Amino acid sequence: MDLTNYSLDLIEHRKGINMSYNFILDRIGVDISRIQEAKDELTFPVRLKTYIEVMTLHELGHAADREALLGSMPWTIKVHELKKAAPEDSHYRDPGILKIILDEQLMNIEFEKTAWKNAESLNRLHQIADEAVFGLIREHSLASYKMPYQQNLRLYDRLLTEANDMIA
């Protein structure tokens, strides 16, 4: 963070999430053991220091988009309340609820893409990580959002097909 002139609090946590930006409190959380595991999940070699620097740039990218994140709060709260009110086993059986989950996942993917775009600008400006390594880490990170979305989208399509088959 020192290299980018950003000054955010860095808080250690044990949430199983390698790094996260808390846009309400405007701080970055890090799970030290999870960040080491996440780095080891990469299919290419990268130094832990480089991985942490790139992920920190990504979290700073979220900080740069804080106003948009704050603006999403009313809808996010509404979705959370809806999911909490519905039995958990219905989330992936009810096309209506699953559609809301998909919309939430799409919104999160867009926030992730924006954070990575902001991180890329910071990286270019400050020359913190090699562009190729940065890109590989970015794609690996984005996949953790895109893959569950794709799985849920396939399930949603299957639920709609089954519903249409029952009607026909």
Image: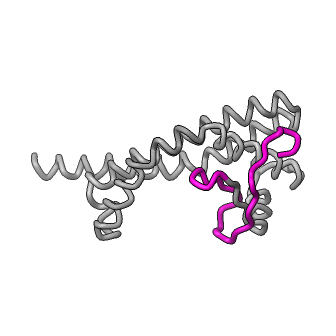
Question: In the image, what residue occupies the spot 64% across and 39% down?
Answer: 115
Residue name at image x 67 percent, y 41 percent: 139
Front in this rendered view, residue 7 or 36: 7
Residue name at image x 29 percent, y 65 percent: 90
x%, y% of residue 79?
36, 54
Q: Is residue 35 left or right of residue 81?
A: right
Q: Is residue 69 left or right of residue 129?
A: left
* Quadrant of the image occupied by residue 25: bottom right
18 in the magenta segment: yes
Asked where in the image residue 19 lies, by quadrant, the reply is: bottom right
Tell me which residue sits at (66%, 37%) in the image.
Answer: 64
Relative to 62, say whether 47 is above or below. Answer: below
Q: Nearer the viewer, residue 75 or 163?
A: 75
Q: Is residue 30 left or right of residue 152?
A: right
Q: Residue furthest left?
A: 168
Q: Which residues are magenta?
A: 1-26
Figure disc tally? 0
Colour pattern of the rendering: one colour
Seen from the viewer's position, the closer of residues 85 and 142 is 85
Q: Using the image as rendered, state which of residue 167 and residue 70 is in the foreground.
A: 70
Q: Position of residue 59 (x, y in %)?
A: 69, 47
The verdict on residue 65 being magenta is no
Residue 127: image x %, image y %?
Answer: 88, 32
Query: Residue 148: where, in percent of width, then height?
Result: 50, 52
Residue 16 occupies quadrant: bottom right
